Amino acid sequence: MTSPVRTAREVVQAYNLELWNEKKFELADELIADTMIRHDVGESNTLTRAQALKRVTDTWAEMDSLRFDLNIVIDAGDGEHVAMVWDSTMTKDGNEVKVASIEVFRVVNGQIVEVWNCGYKLGVWA
């Protein structure tokens, strides 16, 4: 029996709250498509699933702790797009850094295929 495919919102939440926050790296095969395009203003990068996971594990290798807090999660209602406003707290060697951003995800067949991010800024949302 196959398990049901997660909704787009559930995929995005699991990606951030489980894969990133809880280091459940084994979820990468389920949550990330074979390729994932990361869009930034003026450029985009296509990552393989392995490269996308390496981005997560490399970040964790640099940090003592890391946590994403999803302040707002909005499902576009089209079954594919989910936007979120997040704050992240990262700690290394006792030094805490807070970073915030907004991302929009496109999920197809239960896997992330695209992410739009206009960059990160130090601090938290006011």
Image (cartoon, helix red, strand yellow):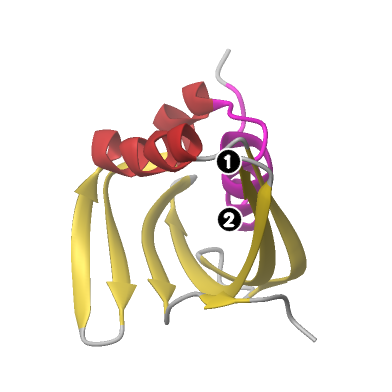
Count the marks: 2
Task: Report which residue position mark 2 lands on.
Answer: 8
Q: Which residues are magenta?
A: 3-24
Q: x%, y% of residue 86? A: 67, 68
Between 12 and 71, the residue placed more toward the observer is 71
Q: Residue at x 50, y 72 (%)?
A: 104
3, above or below 11, in the image: above
Q: x%, y% of residue 105? A: 48, 65
Task: Report which residue position mark 1 lands on.
Answer: 20
15, above or below 37, in the image: above
Between 93 and 82, the residue placed more toward the observer is 93
Task: Report whether residue 41 is seen.
Answer: yes
Which image quarter holds the N terminus? Answer: top right
Kindly report the distance in space between the C-alpha atoms of the residues bearing marks 1 and 2: 17 Å
Relative horizontal placement of residue 125, taking residue 37 as reference (left or right): right
Near mark 1 (Cα within 10 A), the count class, few <14, some 14-19 or many ≥20, is many
Kind of residue sitting beneath label 1: Trp
Per the image, label 2 sits on a secondary structure element best described as helix
Q: Is residue 17 magenta?
A: yes
Task: Report whether residue 10 is seen.
Answer: no
Q: Residue at x 25, y 40 (%)?
A: 51
Q: Residue at x 55, y 19 (%)?
A: 2
Q: Earlier in the sequence, mark 1 or mark 2?
A: 2
Relative horizontal placement of residue 86, taking residue 54 as reference (left or right): right
Near mark 2 (Cα within 10 A), the count class, few <14, some 14-19 or many ≥20, is many
The quadrant holding residue 3 is: top right
The quadrant holding residue 102 is: bottom right
Marks 1, 2: nearer the viewer: 1
Kind of residue sitting beneath label 2: Ala
Per the image, label 1 sits on a secondary structure element best described as helix
Q: x%, y% of residue 79? A: 56, 64
Q: x%, y% of residue 39? A: 30, 73
